[in-house]
Every structure is written in C-alpha cells, then in structure tokens.
Image: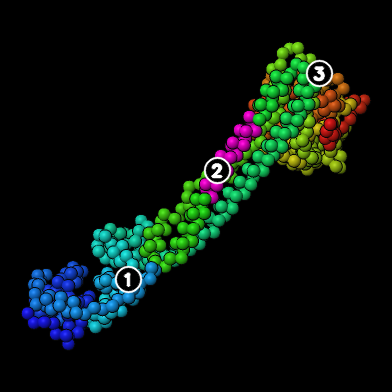
Amino acid sequence: MASANTSWSEEDFSCSICLDVFSSPVTTPCGHNFCRTCITKFWDEQVKYKCPVCNQIFDTKPDPRVNTLLSQLAAQFGTTVRVKEQPCVEPAEVPCDFCTGTQQKAVKSCLECFMSFCQTHLEPHQRVAVLKGHRLVEPMDRLEDRMCKKHNRLLELFCPTEQVCVCQFCTEIDHKSHPVVPLKEEYEVKTAQMGKIEAEVPQMIQERKEKIKEIKDRVELSNKDADREIAIGGQVFTALIGCVEKCRDEFNQTVQEELKSTEKQAEDLIKELEQEIEDLTNRCSEVKQLSHTKDHLHFLQTFRSLKDPPPTRDWTTVEVRPPSYVGTLRRSLDQLEETLNMEMKKLCDDAELKRVQQYEEDVTLDPDTAASNLILSEDGKQVHHGCVGKVLPDNPKRFTKYIFVLTRQSFSSGRFYFEVQVKDKTVWWLGVVRESIYRKGKTTWTPETGYWTLHYYKDGLVFRDNPDVRLPLRAELQKVGVFVDYEEGVVSFYDVEARVHIYSATGCTFSEPLYPILSPGPHDYKGNNSAPLIISPVNQKD
C-alpha cells in the first residue's frame, strides 16, 4: 500500500459536508465521497435525494459503497496530521454540531438542516448552490426541541386557541380552523403580560406583609386585653379570697387558654402567610428570569406554567379577633356556691363595666332621623320631646310614627359602648337597631324586626322581645350604659351609677350596620317626663 502523500492537505481527505477528515467514507453513484453519517443524515432531511456537491438527483435513496482506499488514506493522514484545537465555546454560546473533538462556537443555525455551524463548517452553505438557499439564523441551541414532533417542521407559529406552538403543516391540518400568529407577535403579547405579573407579585407580597403586621398588632392587643382582664379579675377575687380561691384559678386558666388559642391561630396564619411570601418570592424570581430571555419558544413554553400566580388564600377577610372577655368573670362567679352574697355580684358587675367602658365611642344624634316633635341640642348630645311637631322636609331616614332618633354613627364590626343619662325620666327607650328598620309606620320593637332596646316606664323595666323580658325595677336609675359586641352577637345594658349589669341579649345575629337609638318618650301638659336624654362621656372609676 502506498504511503500517504505528505504534500496532500487536509482538504483532500475532508468531507464536503462536515469539513472534517473522512470518517467511514462512502462514494455516491456520481463519484463524490462523504462520511457515511453525513450523507445519510443529509438525505434523511431532504425531500429529494441528491448529491450535495453536483446536485445530481437520484430516483431512489442510493446505497453508497464504502471507499476502502480512501478509508486507508484518510486513516494514515489522520495519524500524521494533528490539528491542535483550543476550546472556544463559552457556557452561554451554541456549539457547532459538526466539530469533532473540541467543539467550536456556532455562528449560524440552519433551519433546513436543523444544525448549528461554526465559521469553518458553515462554508458549504456559502459555496454549494443548493445549500445557499437554506434559511440561516442566529445560533440556536436545542434545535430538535424547536421541531414539530408530528410534522418534523420548524415551530414558528403560535395558536392562541390551544396556547401551543405549531408548524406551518399544523395550521393546515390539526389547527386548520384556529387563528395563528407568528411567535414574535405572541412573544410581545406575553411579554406585556409578564410586566403585569411582575408588578402584581410584589404587590401581593406587600399585602401579605401588611397582613402579618396586622395579625401581630392584634396579638399584641390580645395580650393587653388579657393582662387587663387578669388584673380586673384579680381585684375581684382578692376581695373574696377566702371563698373563691379555686374560682379565681379557674378564671385565670380560662383567660390564658383563650389567649393561647388566639396566639395559636395567629401563629398558624403567619406561617401560612410567610409560606405564601416565600412561594411568591420564588415566583417573582422565576418571572424575572424568564422575562429576560429572548428565546421565543422557550419563553412561550415556560410561560404557560408561570402566567397564573401560585394558589394563594384571599386574605382580605382573614383576621385574628381578640377574645371577648365580657361575661367571662360573671359566668365564672355564677359557678360559685349559693353562699356567695350580693357583694360578689357587685364586684363582678363593676369589673365588667370597667371592661366594656374601654370601648367607648363618641356618638351624636342625627337630626335627619329625628321625629318631627323631637328637639335636639346643637351639639347633638341631648334630645327631649317638644309639644308641637315641626314641618320638616320629607326624608326616607326620618321616623314619622314613633318619637325616635338615631345617631350619625353606625357600627358594622367590633365592639362599642356609650352611656345615656336618664335622670328624672319616667319613660324612655334606649338601645341599638339595624339600619334597615321600618321608620314610616307601626311596627314591633323586637330583635326579629331589628330592635334591641330597653324600655323604661314608671311601672317597669323591659327588654323588648317576643315575649318581653321583664326586669327588676332599679331605684334611682340615672345613667344607662349600652355595650355591643358585633361578632359575638351580644347587646348588654348597665346601671352605670350602681355599677350593676342589667341585662344581656346573647346569640344575636348582626348582618348590617347597627345604630344607637334613643327616645325620650312623650311628656304631658304638666311637664312630666320633660327632662332630656343626654349622651354622656364615660367616667371610669378606679
């Protein structure tokens, strides 16, 4: 066998497709030589079988024969010629698909061959006529992922109907009735949506941080309420230390358990919020990372999993409500033996009144609701019955049948308390009503119709219900306190001067704003019951 001619160059033993030294060279019917892998791959990607060099077309796919002599010469040449290759592909760059050994950086990708080429291996596409017509683009990695699995054609369109990338053949078959747009056009639409997501996610995070602060503030308030409750209870039980030691311990335990329950609820909510913040933060990072990609296909394929935010709870209605201790001490004392005397009840009521007085609200009377024969003071704090009704403009809020007046303020949540002086009165109504009560005609004053009121007259004290709840008359009743816990459904009345609990309506259901309501009752020609009802500031006793 003749030795390799050292005057030959590498080009003499190079495949015109891959431009590398022949590997398993074969000869086509037209006499040109190629690597077996190169020519086989070339023909697999063509509609017609032709020679890459002379463009001769073959009717059927040729079965090229191994060129034994060329194989031996190429092998000998390969042992004498060593091309020193230096790595030149950075991590973010696309490597050449034809380089053997160390891959070079691709400068173009061919959408016909579905391969990427370095400057050296791109040469046939710049020289061979049939390759010159191929569509060259900037280097792209994972070209196989850019191909339609069904039609083996480039994914270059987007179907908004099914939210998938499609090839041209897809639009003529499976997506024939669907509108399609170029990838770039859909990319721009999704990029705009991405901007909205980037703006919304931080806002969601901020809202949850604010909710955490709100919960922590509520927990702090719960602690203060618990401390205050324990202190008040301690005073009561200290006065009765000889016979109520056990009851005091049980009371403290009840308060602590309610506090722990509130703290546990808050802790669970905070953990859930922090987890959502972590999920949303991760989401934000993913969105930001994706928003910087220029790879249309990768962007659209990944966007589907990112366009919807991760499942989160609607926190607008979530809150940690401090426990209501109103009645706790009284219920605890009710469990004591019958030997407990009236002094114990007095101490209990005094402590409870102190507790509810902290929820004082400054309320004033609304003249637009006052019956025509009521006279209100300029500061809206007093009301008494006049002898003659005034001619007033028609107002849907005004009472026309009964001599009632509401306050300007309404309450739709939480707890509130106010006091009204009833000194020198022989008749009055006092309490709260819901906003939608009937104001223009006859009605009953019961919780069913939206009234929670205490009615006083010379022969009795009644909570209006069906049936009425008759209460013991209280001597020298001068000032009445009204307390409402909206969420707990409690309306309570207190004799402020005697510091005694009068009555509580429990199990109430409130679903709309509540308004304090006052009625001074009528007075006769002798001036009986002419004294006003006066909304008074709370004067808490030590």
Label 3 is placed on what type of residue?
Glu
Q: Is residue 189 above or below residue 349?
A: below
- Is the image coloured rainbow, by chain, by secondary structure, or in one colour? rainbow
Location of mark 2 (residue): 271
Location of mark 3 (residue): 343
Q: Residues within 10 Å of mark 3 (few under 14, many from 20)?
A: few
Among numbered discs 1 and 2, the one appearing first in the sequence: 1
Q: Nearer the viewer, residue 537 or 180?
A: 537
Horizontal arrangement in the rendering, residue 449 relative to residue 103 (left or right): right
Label 1 is placed on what type of residue?
Pro
User: Which stretch is magenta?
Assistant: 257-277
Q: Residues within 10 Å of mark 1 (few under 14, many from 20)?
A: many
Among numbered discs 2 and 3, the one appearing first in the sequence: 2
Q: CA distance from mark 1 to mark 2?
A: 47 Å
Q: Residues within 10 Å of mark 2 (few under 14, many from 20)?
A: few
Location of mark 1 (residue): 95
Residue 319 lies in quadrant = top right
Q: Quadrant of the N terminus?
A: bottom left
Residue 535 lies in quadrant = top right
Q: Nearer the viewer, residue 488 or 66?
A: 66
Asked if residue 387 can be seen in this view, the reply is yes
